[in-house]
Image (cartoon, grey):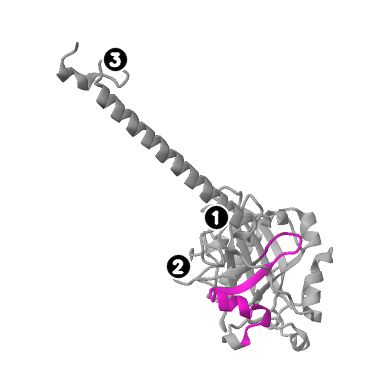
């Protein structure tokens, strides 16, 4: 028989290991096994709940409220039937430099969206705004599943990165407007909306359809409504890039101190366009940029963006 002080060097399956110690060890092993099973079951239930929330309940996103049946909204909803782009009239700001008084009189004024008190919120968005006042608009792209509210949280820019409209955790998050963008009476030149490129095609998972010129020809416009005003937007450029690859990246362009700076930033974006849309942004146009990752992986520096201008 081994000496007692040598027991500590013996393995649990040794015939010389004391029976009591071996029994206690097996009891601990059974407890650890049950604990691991419980942890695995909890993780499986959590994953199942998140999958059901994402697939059945749209990741906490509401359904699109009905749009009023007006002539203007019907025109916006029927924009997907167009197969060619008609370049909109020049803005008053551009024509002011030409000295042509008649042309200036006929020019389309630059749109100036204004954020008004709740009493002026469009009726279709009032209930949603009452549920979550972080909502600032609604984005819809025909031919895709992109039909979501757009959120904004100044002071906590990425609050909705992994939260749904109901503020609960969601792997897909929500579409959100950069905190440096203003939709008010003095709007920034470029509004930047972010969204995840999800593998299940939710959020901006189908934004890459715009990399196909044929899809663009069928869907040259989309709608983005602020809380107080419906808006139709015309795609001007679709681009791919990488974080840190550009001297003037699109994701740092929100406003410009001068016309020259505005033109330089727009030219830098247009130079990366994958194809020619025939649309050139003009100084004074309200710009909107939709931004997502270049792939569905979160571990990537690739970026995909769609630049659009507002049309009447």
The residue shown at (68%, 62%) is 146
The residue sitting at the top extreme is: 1
- Residue occupied by mark 1: 171
The residue shown at (58%, 63%) is 60
Q: Is residue 211 above or below residue 267?
A: above
Q: Is residue 154 above or below residue 49?
A: below
Toward the viewer: 305 or 153?
153
The quadrant in which the C terminus is found is bottom right
Q: Which comes sooner in the sequence, label 3 or label 2? A: 3
Q: Position of residue 134 (x, y in %)?
A: 53, 73
Q: What secondary structure is found at the residue carrying circle 3?
A: loop
Q: What secondary structure is found at the residue carrying circle 2?
A: loop
Q: Which comes sooner in the sequence, label 1 or label 2? A: 2
Q: Is residue 217 above or below residue 256?
A: above
- Residue occupied by mark 3: 15
Q: Position of residue 257 (x, y in %)?
A: 52, 75
Toward the viewer: 53 or 171?
53
Mark 3–mark 1 Cα distance, whole angstroms, equals 53 Å
Question: Could one spot residue 283 in this view of the protein?
Answer: no
Residue 256, image quadrant: bottom right
Q: Find out whether residue 311 is within the magenta segment.
A: no
| Residue 277 falls left or right of residue 171 | right
Magenta range: 120-147
- Residue occupied by mark 2: 156
Q: What secondary structure is found at the residue carrying circle 1?
A: loop
Q: Which comes sooner in the sequence, label 3 or label 1? A: 3
Toward the viewer: 79 or 188?
79
């Amino acid at each position: 028989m081994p000496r007692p002080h040598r027991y500590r060097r013996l393995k649990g399956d040794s015939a010389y290991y004391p029976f009591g110690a071996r029994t206690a060890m097996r009891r601990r092993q059974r407890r650890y096994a049950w604990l691991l099973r419980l942890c695995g079951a909890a993780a499986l239930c959590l994953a199942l709940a998140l999958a059901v929330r994402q697939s059945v309940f749209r990741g906490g996103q509401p359904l699109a409220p009905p749009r009023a049946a007006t002539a203007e909204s019907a025109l916006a909803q029927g924009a997907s039937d167009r197969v060619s782009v008609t370049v909109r009239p020049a803005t008053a700001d551009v024509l002011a430099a030409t000295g042509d008084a008649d042309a200036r009189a006929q020019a389309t004024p630059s749109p100036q969206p204004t954020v008004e008190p709740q009493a002026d919120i469009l009726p279709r968005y009032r209930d949603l705004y009452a549920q979550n006042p972080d909502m600032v608009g609604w984005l819809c792209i025909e031919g895709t599943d992109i039909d979501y509210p757009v959120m904004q949280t100044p002071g906590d820019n990425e609050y909705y990165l992994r939260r749904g409209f109901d503020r609960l955790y969601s792997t897909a998050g929500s579409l959100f407007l950069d905190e440096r963008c203003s939709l008010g009476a003095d709007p920034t030149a470029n509004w930047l909306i972010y969204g995840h490129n999800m593998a299940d095609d939710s959020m901006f998972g189908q934004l890459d359809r715009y990399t196909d010129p044929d899809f663009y020809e069928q869907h040259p416009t989309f709608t983005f409504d602020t809380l107080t005003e419906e808006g139709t937007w015309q795609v001007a450029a679709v681009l791919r890039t990488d974080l840190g690859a550009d001297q003037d990246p699109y994701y740092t362009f929100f406003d410009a101190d001068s016309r020259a700076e505005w033109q330089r930033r727009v030219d830098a974006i247009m130079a990366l366009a994958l194809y020619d849309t025939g649309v050139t942004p003009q100084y004074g146009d309200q710009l909107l940029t939709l931004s997502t990752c270049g792939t569905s992986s979160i571990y990537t520096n690739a970026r995909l963006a769609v630049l659009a201008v507002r049309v009447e």
